[in-house]
Amino acid sequence: MKNTTKVVLAVVVTTAVAVPATAVAGGRLFEPRPTEAHSFVTGDTPSIADGVALGKNVAWYKSSGLGPSALNREPGVSAEERYVPTDVFPGGELPDGVTITEAQGINALMRIGENLERAGLSYDDVVSMRVFLQNPDGEEAMDFAGWNRAYRQFFANTNLASGETLDVQLGSTTTEPMVVNEARPSRFALEIENLPVDGWLVEVEVDAVYDR
């Protein structure tokens, strides 16, 4: 049986610049300048930020929750398979180890990129992310590992110290990321009982900031 999760969330966001885990400014532990946002990141290759500190005058954008597009029109596909991105996986065929959640995650994040572009933004402007995952049919829990593989195709795939691009997993293999991006958003991911569209396993909402 799937678990139902109820969430109450307050989020504030802005332009992200990585800072040390501990910083002192003006006698306080840390305080961002009015037009800045600072992502607190631990280590050189983390997947997410510890948090984001926001200045009061930063312009930011909040997306709607977006799931994957129904791109797979192959005959006889299931509701979940309908959301496999056939421009990435021709014919809806998934390579070895690629899960349906992973494929849908890639699809949903591609939609996020299109949404950001219309607002004059890109993946590297994202500072906060909320992810909702539904159990695949026949599974007792969400596929968090599959989601994380999809996420690293678009986010957190560089070494912050060296600038080197990291190889990422696609199912059972490693590849270059689809989008090279050093941004590490603050993030949460939750398993929920049902997403609003039949067949969706992934829905994503992001906050992004404009350069000042």
Image (cartoon, grey):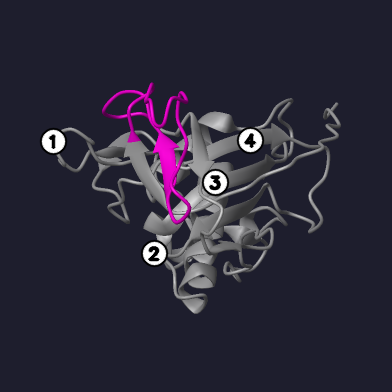
Give the labeled residue for mark 1.
162
**Is the C-beta separation of discs 4 and 1 under 8 Å?**
no
The crowding category of the residue bearing disc 2, from other C-alpha atoms within 10 Å (few below 14, some 14 to 19, many at least 20), is some
Across and down, in percent, residue 108 comes to: 56, 58
Q: Which mark is residue 202?
A: none
Residue at far bottom of view:
118
Q: Give the CA separation, mark 2 to mark 4.
A: 27 Å
The crowding category of the residue bearing disc 3, from other C-alpha atoms within 10 Å (few below 14, some 14 to 19, many at least 20), is many
Question: Looking at the figure, which quarter contains the C terminus?
Answer: bottom left
- Give the residue displayed 48% in from the left and 52% down from the top: 34
Across and down, in percent, residue 137 comes to: 73, 39
Of the two numbered discs 1 and 2 on the same chain, state the one appearing first in sequence. 1
Q: Is residue 117 above or below residue 126?
A: below
Tell me the amino acid under the disc marked 4.
Ala
Tell me the amino acid under the disc marked 1.
Ser
Tell me the amino acid under the disc marked 3.
Ser
Give the labeled residue for mark 2.
211
Give the labeled residue for mark 3.
128
Give the labeled residue for mark 4.
189
Of the two numbered discs 2 and 4 on the same chain, state the one appearing first in sequence. 4
- Where residue 135 sits, quadrant-wise, is top right
Q: Secondary structure at mark 2?
A: loop
